[in-house]
Amino acid sequence: MRFYRIRTKTRVFAILALTTLLAAASVPASAMAEEKGGAKQQGPATDLASNAKSAILMDADSGTIIYEKNSHVQLPPASITKIMTMLLVMEALDEGKLKLTDKVQTSEYAASMGGSQIFLEPGEEMTVDDMLKGVALASGNDASVALAEKLAGSEEEFVKLMNERAEQLGMKNTRFVNCNGLPAPSHLSSAYDIAMMSRELLKHEEITKYTGLYQDYLRKDQPKPFWLVNTNKLVRFYHGADGLKTGFTGEAKFCLSATAKRDNLRLIAVVMGEPNTKTRNAEVSKLFDYAFAQFTNVPIYRTGDPIGTLKVEKGAVAKLPIVAKHSYSVLVRKGDAKNQIRHDLVLDSKVTAPVKAGQQVGKLIVYRGNDVLTEFPIEAPASVERAGWWTLFKRSAGKLFMNG
């Protein structure tokens, strides 16, 4: 496939200091490996999550891995599973399949879930908004199943959607058996896969309005309001933390997918198999402290910024403006030359209708000098149907008159 290239206007070049080149040439054994969508960064010299069975630290915007430990090992994820449940709900909201004000009725099956719950009664109704609070703050197993049934008709059908989405995201070591993480044979994931689905969830920026709350109430208009307290204590005690999801079972031990943002830098840290909550929170805090001290982000585009224009051949619409669906940035070590960062938008040279919203139509390539730091997929912002013959005729006739 051929491409056409759109050059950015801003290209500033600088020569990296010799010390930076020497540092990059001597990456220690603990340095991160290059992953799809990420770039190489020199990792910490010490093990920042020594008590975890597996762990990973990632820049949310670029997907750059800063630290990892056994990150592809399959382990039971416990309630971190609910990140995928929340992701599918947020995508359904974006697509108009659900509204936050929609009522969700609790089935007997949903109400029968054990473990963490918001104590839904069979037949009880709550809005999608309140159910999301129940999942994000209280890790409600009952609320997760109720939402799954609302969206897909049954938990089994919802789990199929979960596994399909996991495959789309490249989560190769993940298999979901339920929507809430209760112990089940073959219900497995990995720290890397959890970071990838956490990164996808964070593209829906409004999710942190739920995951970042420390406390709230359900059933506010009833005689006995139900007090919710976030199971992730970092949202109260760590500056910048606003999510995402804790997990615990006797099999999985203490797990956490956490996110924190300071200035322009948003991080994701995942730890699995920690011995207790105190150690789990301390090691995630240590991971965040390291990254915030060592790295910064260079913004490329912010959410809503215009990126370019996509030409659609034989489409009802001939051109589609492309805007940033989320922020695009790259991770650099503090003190490195930021002004050598440049980027190119490379769109497919021939995109023919029909086009589906979300269909990949190109990529945004970010360079430091001549080296590729990362690539971001660029998707069609809307669907475009094939134009009718009369529209195509008028379009062709117009070109003939213009050329004449």
Image (tube, grey):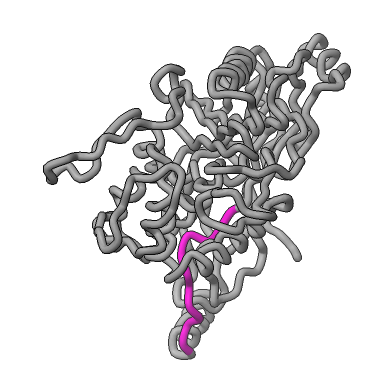
Residue numbers of the magenta segment: 378-388
Query: Residue at left 55%, top 48%?
Result: 181
Q: Is residue 71 visible?
A: yes
Numbered label tally: 0
Direction top: furthest residue: 19
Query: Residue at left 87%, top 17%?
Result: 26
Q: Note whether 7 is above or below 99 in the view shown.
A: above
Horizontal and vertical percent for residue 106? 32, 61
Horizontal and vertical percent for residue 309? 52, 57
Q: Magenta span has 381?
A: yes
In the image shown, does 304 or 263 lie closer to the viewer? 263
User: Is residue 228 shown left or right of residue 342?
Assistant: left
User: Is residue 199 shown left or right of residue 233?
Assistant: right
* Quarter assignment of residue 178: bottom right
Q: Quadrant of the N terminus?
A: bottom right
Q: Is residue 401 visible?
A: no
